[in-house]
Image: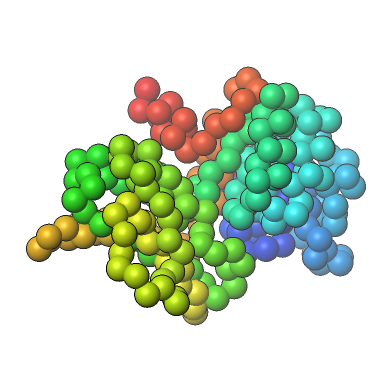
């Protein structure tokens, strides 16, 4: 498997480079807007349209702003794309939808298998506990993370919303609010500081009891391994949209 890697010089780009070497997977070219001639084990360019090497699949850990350029290249080369960035806006999500009609596109807010098991557990808990339990989601990340709340927190909110018949409305923090908590609210809170790799808590608060489901990522390498696993999964797939739930279903047979 030959990989074109977006965001090659970033934290996650370096993790994917290390994970690929360990798995004996070849990165044929990297793309990073910060490239100014830094030494690398593979060629790096500063824009996707400068990549000349033929790759089997594109993995992107850059920023949403790179999406139009990378999708243009992927569609032109009929190359599957694994999108690992978070913070896409509605217009960018529409671009992904359109591209998925021509190429296989894998997008997940979190490439960790553990987080995606958490997603399943959250759905089951929300379905079982129902509207008698208040739900709050807390995510914590390092000081360098740009988007807030995290894509994973929003994914977990969607899991709660999809599992219950009651209308669930997100509330992003509670600064300035003077009213009591309303039925159906799901509080979503973001913490930024230090070098926290990533933590997500989904809290169910009932009358005299609470259930807290937690995932803590201790190493970024787990996201890199998940991205490589997603790339391998996508290799033989037809055009369409895929995510970690599809990969897990295939793993379970």
Which of the image's four quarters has the C terminus? top left
Is 69 placed left or right of 92 in the picture?
right
Q: Is residue 37 above or below residue 63?
A: below
Decide if residue 135 is in sight here. no
Q: Residue at x 41, y 73 (%)?
A: 177
- Quarter of the image for residue 161 reads top left
The answer to whether any part of residue 252 appears in the image is yes
Q: State the residue at coordinates (36%, 44%).
A: 167
Q: Residue at x 85, y 57 (%)?
A: 46
The x, y position of residue 197, in whole percent, is 47, 66
Q: Residue furthest front?
A: 179
Number of numbered discs: 0
Extreme bottom residue here?
Answer: 194
Q: Give 15 or 133, whichever is nearer the viewer.
A: 133
30, above or below 239, in the image: below
Residue drawn at 58 percent across, 68 percent down? 145
Q: Quadrant of the N terminus?
A: top right
Where residue 85 appears, as percent x and y from the top left, is: 62, 52
Instruction: Quadrant for residue 93, please give it.
Output: top right
Q: Position of residue 89 (x, y in %)?
A: 65, 50
- In which quadrant of the rendered view does residue 199 lie? bottom left
Residue 251 horizontal/vertical position (percent): 40, 29
Considering depth in this image, is 4 or 118 the residue closer to the camera? Answer: 118
In this view of the protein, which residue sits in the foreground, 52 or 137?
A: 137
């Amino acid at each position: 498997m030959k990989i074109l890697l977006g965001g090659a010089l970033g934290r996650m780009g370096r993790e994917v480079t290390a994970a690929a070497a360990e798995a004996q997977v070849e990165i044929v070219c990297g793309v990073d807007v910060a490239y100014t001639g830094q030494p690398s084990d593979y060629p790096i360019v500063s824009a996707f349209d400068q990549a000349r090497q033929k790759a089997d699949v594109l993995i992107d850990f850059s920023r949403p702003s790179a999406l139009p350029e990378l999708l243009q290249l992927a569609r032109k080369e009929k190359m599957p794309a694994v999108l690992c960035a978070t913070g896409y806006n509605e217009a960018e999500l529409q671009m992904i939808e359109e591209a998925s009609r021509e190429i296989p596109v894998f997008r997940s807010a979190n490439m960790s298998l553990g987080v995606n098991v958490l997603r399943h557990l959250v759905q089951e808990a929300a379905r079982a506990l129902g509207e008698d339990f208040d739900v709050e989601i807390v995510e914590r990340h390092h000081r360098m993370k740009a988007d807030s709340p995290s894509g994973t927190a929003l994914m977990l909110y969607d899991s709660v919303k999809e599992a219950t018949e009651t209308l669930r409305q997100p509330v992003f923090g509670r600064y300035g609010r003077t009213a009591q908590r309303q039925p159906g609210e799901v509080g979503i809170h973001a913490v930024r500081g230090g070098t926290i790799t990533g933590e997500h808590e989904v809290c169910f608060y009932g009358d005299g009891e609470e259930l807290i489901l937690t995932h803590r990522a201790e190493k970024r390498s787990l996201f890199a391994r998940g991205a490589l696993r997603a790339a391998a999964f996508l290799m033989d797939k037809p055009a369409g949209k895929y995510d970690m739930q599809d990969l897990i279903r295939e793993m379970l047979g």
